[in-house]
Amino acid sequence: MSEADLWKTIEADADAFEDLTTEASTELAGLIRQVGKVQTDLVRAEENLKLLKRNRDRYLHELIPQKMQETGLEKVVVGGNSVSLATFVSGTMPKDPMQRDIALSHLREIGASDFIKNQVSVSFPVSEDNRARAMQADLEEKGFDTAAKTWVEPQTLKKLIRERVESGQEIDLEIFNAHIGTIAKIKGE
C-alpha cells in the first residue's frame, strides 16, 4: 500500500494543522500528526497480520501436507515433537436464500435433517412486555422449548445514558459499566 493510499484511511490530513502558531497549537499539531502515524502503522500491521495468517495457512494446508504425502509420511516425530496429517473440514451454509434452500433440501434428502435447526422470532416493542411473556408461556405450555432475548441496542443505550446525564436525570452508570469522558475526533475537509 502506498503512502498516499494509507492517508486515505485516516479522516484528516495531519499536515493541514501545521499553520497553528501558538506553542500549545504546535503541540496539538504534533499530537494530531502522531495519531495519524499510529493510524497508518495500525493499517500496515493489520495488513501484515492478514498476510502472515495466509502464509501460515498455506504451510499448514498445502506445503507441509504435500511434502509429507510425496515422501509417504503420515507422521514425523523428532525429539518429542511431532507433525502428523489429519483431515481438515471447512464448510458454511450459503448466504443466498435460494442456495440455502437447496442446501437444506439436500440435507433432508440425505437423511441429515436432524442437524437442521429452526428458530422462530417475534419482536415486541417495550410497551408490549407482558404480551411477549404471555406468548412465551403459552408456547411452553404447548411443549415448545423457548428462548427469549430482551436487549437495548448499543447506540440507543449510549444515547439514553448521554441524555439522562446531560439533563441531570437518574441513571446508574455502574450497572451499564458506563464511562463518560472526552475524545478527540479528527475529520478532514
Image: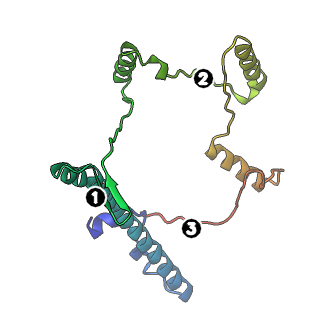
Q: Nearer the viewer, residue 137 or 71?
A: 71
The type of residue carrying mark 1 is Asn
Residue 114 is situated, as x and y percent measured from the top left of the image, at 48, 19
Task: Spot the residue most to the left.
Answer: 70
Residue 145 is situated, as x and y percent measured from the top left of the image, at 66, 20
Disc 2 versus disc 1: nearer the observer: 1
Q: Is residue 174 left or right of residue 32?
A: right
Name the residue rendered at 34%, 61% in the picture: 47
Name the residue rendered at 47%, 72% in the picture: 35
What is the image's colouring?
A: rainbow
Q: Is residue 28 left or right of residue 74?
A: right
Task: Spot the residue most to the bottom.
Answer: 23
Asked whether the beta carbons under mark 2 and mark 1 sit within 8 Å of each other, the answer is: no
Q: Earlier in the sequence, mark 1 or mark 3?
A: 1
Residue 115 is situated, as x and y percent measured from the top left of the image, at 47, 23
Circle 3: element type: loop
Q: Which mark is residue 55?
A: 1
- Residue count near mark 2 (Cα–Cα under 10 Å), binned few <14, some 14–19, many ≥20: few
Q: Which mark is residue 128?
A: none
The type of residue carrying mark 2 is Ser
Question: Could you give the CA–CA distance between mark 2 and mark 3, rounded to whole angstroms?
Answer: 40 Å
The type of residue carrying mark 3 is Ala
Q: Earlier in the sequence, mark 2 or mark 1?
A: 1
Disc 1 versus disc 3: nearer the observer: 1
Residue identifier under label 3: 184
> Looking at the rendering, which quadrant does residue 51 occupy?
bottom left
Q: Is residue 57 left or right of residue 39?
A: left
Residue 182 is situated, as x and y percent measured from the top left of the image, at 64, 66
Against 26, residue 100 (above or below) is above
Circle 1: element type: helix
Residue identifier under label 2: 121
